[in-house]
Amino acid sequence: MSANRPFVLTIAGLDPSGGAGILADIKTFEQHRVYGLTINTGNTIQTENTFYEIQWTDLDFVLRSIETLFENYTIEAVKIGIVPSLDYLKSIVFTIKRLSPESKIIWDTVLKSTTEFDFLTIENKSILIEILQNIDLITPNFEEILLLEPSQSDAEIAAELLSEYCPVLLKGGHNIQDTGVDYLYMDDEIYAFEPKNKAVPEKHGSGCVLSSAITAQIALGENTINACAKSKKYTESYLQSCLTKLGIHYV
């Protein structure tokens, strides 16, 4: 442990604007007083407004990085962001579980960028289920959940179905009916997290911030419900930090 801070790991892409990806995760980890480790799944060319391209990191390199970090640190929780395929994600998840079965895994299901660039296509439902059964929480928005469960046109029904395999935090930023309300589907229960203020400036990377805050809270010993509640408050502070799309991190 570094200065009595638990170790957490983000496995995600590098956004050079610092608004999303591993840079946003590390900023969030630091504010939560956990020690953040990183593994880069891909280098991107982007700004807070436009996504141009991504160069993926070779899977073997990522897996060797995971093995090295877990051999040297006790990692309490892992946040996973963008990955190019289900097979890539499965290899990451199963490697973590082999090395450290007790480590919690949170998958921020970044399936598309806001500019409609496809990061991940759900080709095989059986592989997806196998992955979800080894994950502690997924954090899709109202658009991503329908890509994970394409048999449904209702995001809330899709979340309920997927919660049979792991807890689902359905983020409310794209919820037309009730903007900003997040729903946690877990253990046959639904928990609603209301925003304090729905009229907040748009921010690049807010989903990354929320999922990494949850990862930090879980590493600090919070249960999933409390972790989601506290992380929503943190993310709302991030959203209200300034008027630009690149937010400021503070507690």
Image (cartoon, rainbow, N blue to C red):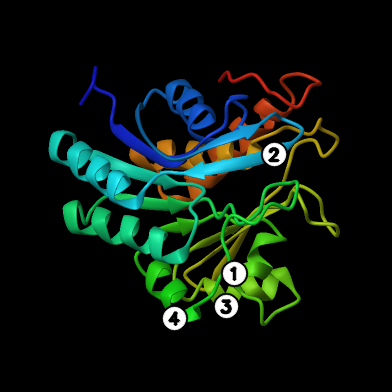
Secondary element at tag 2: strand
Residues marked 4 and 2 touching at CB (< 8 Å): no
Residue pointed to by mark 1: 148
Residue pointed to by mark 2: 51
Residue pointed to by mark 3: 161
Left or right placement of residue 99 versus residue 162 in this view? left
Indicate the amino acid at tag 4: Ser
Indicate the amino acid at tag 3: Leu
In the image, is residue 75 above or below residue 136? above
Residues marked 2 and 3 touching at CB (< 8 Å): no
Task: First in sequence, mark 3 or 1: give its number.
Answer: 1
Indicate the amino acid at tag 1: Leu
Task: Mark 2: give few (<14), some (14-19) or many (20+) Cα within 10 Å.
Answer: some
Which residue lies at the image location 14% right of the left edge and 34% below the top edge? 72
Which residue lies at the image location 44% right of the left edge and 81% below the top edge? 126
Secondary element at tag 3: helix
Q: CA distance from mark 4 to mark 1?
A: 12 Å
Q: Is residue 172 visible?
A: yes
Question: Residue 192, percent across and down?
Answer: 66, 56
Residue pointed to by mark 4: 126
Question: Residue 245, percent across and down?
Answer: 75, 27
Which residue lies at the image location 72% right of the left edge and 61% below the top edge? 143
Q: Is residue 192 visible?
A: no
Q: Nearer the viewer, mark 4 or mark 3?
A: 4
Task: First in sequence, mark 4 or 1: give its number.
Answer: 4
Q: CA distance from mark 2 to mark 3?
A: 31 Å
